[in-house]
Image (spheres, helix red, strand yellow):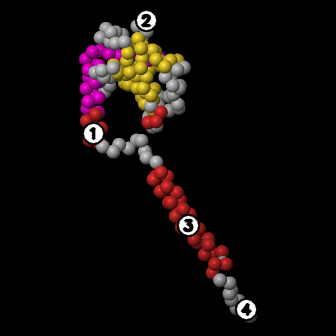
Amino acid sequence: MYVDVKDNTPWYKQPWPWLLMIMPATAVVAGLYTYSLAASGSSGLVVDDYYKVGRAINYSLAKGHKATELGLQGNMALSGQTVTLTLDNAVVQDQQQLVLKVFHATFPDRDQEVLLSKSATGQWTGRIHALSAGKWYAQLLPLDASWRLDGVLPTAAATALALQPAQ
């Protein structure tokens, strides 16, 4: 003989509806959190005006060609917070100051600009803030920005860098 037992408890006191609703509810909460992350900050890697950036790239390539015409190359050494630059070219020996720009690969707020002054040894030196972890790009320009040399520091711990004309 079978006994017919009826469950008269309301649906919200049963475990199955809650177990079925937990996954969609979790997806909604995660979606709202993701939206808040996206809306709260801007990405420094996204450029708003592509046309203007493209024109600037063409202008900067001309600076690299000028450095190639002049036969410029350099070596940069980092020792603590001191930057030492060696350029063996008569064209730049009369430059008393050069500008070194150091860019972090992903965080634009960590970028630095250093003014290098010519020392009695024929090298240019300057002080730089400690570089945080990651890949760094370096640009060397004269004060009139007529030419440009580029280089890449693969890690912040690197102590030497070869500077070549911008490509």
Sequence-wise, the earlier of marks 1 and 3 is: 3
C-alpha span from label 4 to label 2: 105 Å
Q: For the N terminus, give its image quadrant.
A: bottom right
The residue identified by callout 1 is: 52
Q: Residue at x 53, y 32 (%)?
A: 133
Return the mark for residue 120.
Answer: 2
Structural distance between the alpha carbons of marks 1 and 4: 81 Å
Q: Is residue 15 above or below residue 28?
A: below
Q: Report the amino acid beneath label 2.
A: Ala
Q: Percent x, y for residue 19?
A: 62, 71
Q: Are marks 1 and 4 in contact (CB under 8 Å)?
A: no
> Residue 139 sits in which quadrant?
top left
2 or 1: tag closer to the N-terminus: 1
Report which residue position mark 4 lands on. 3
Instruction: Estimate the spatial distance between the alpha carbons at disc 2 and disc 1, rounded to whole Å.
Output: 41 Å
Q: Residues within 10 Å of mark 3 (few under 14, many from 20)?
A: few
Q: Which mark is residue 25?
A: 3
Between disc 1 and disc 4, the foreground one is: 1
Q: Is residue 7 left or right of residue 166?
A: right
Residue 160 drawn at (x, y percent): 47, 19
Q: If the image is split into quadrants, where does the C terminus sit?
A: top left
- Image position of 36 with respect to 111: above or below: below
Numbered range of the magenta stretch: 57-78
Q: 50 or 119: which is nearer to us?
A: 119
Characterize the local packing of mark 1: few (<14), some (14-19) or many (20 or more) Cα atoms within 10 angstroms.
Answer: few
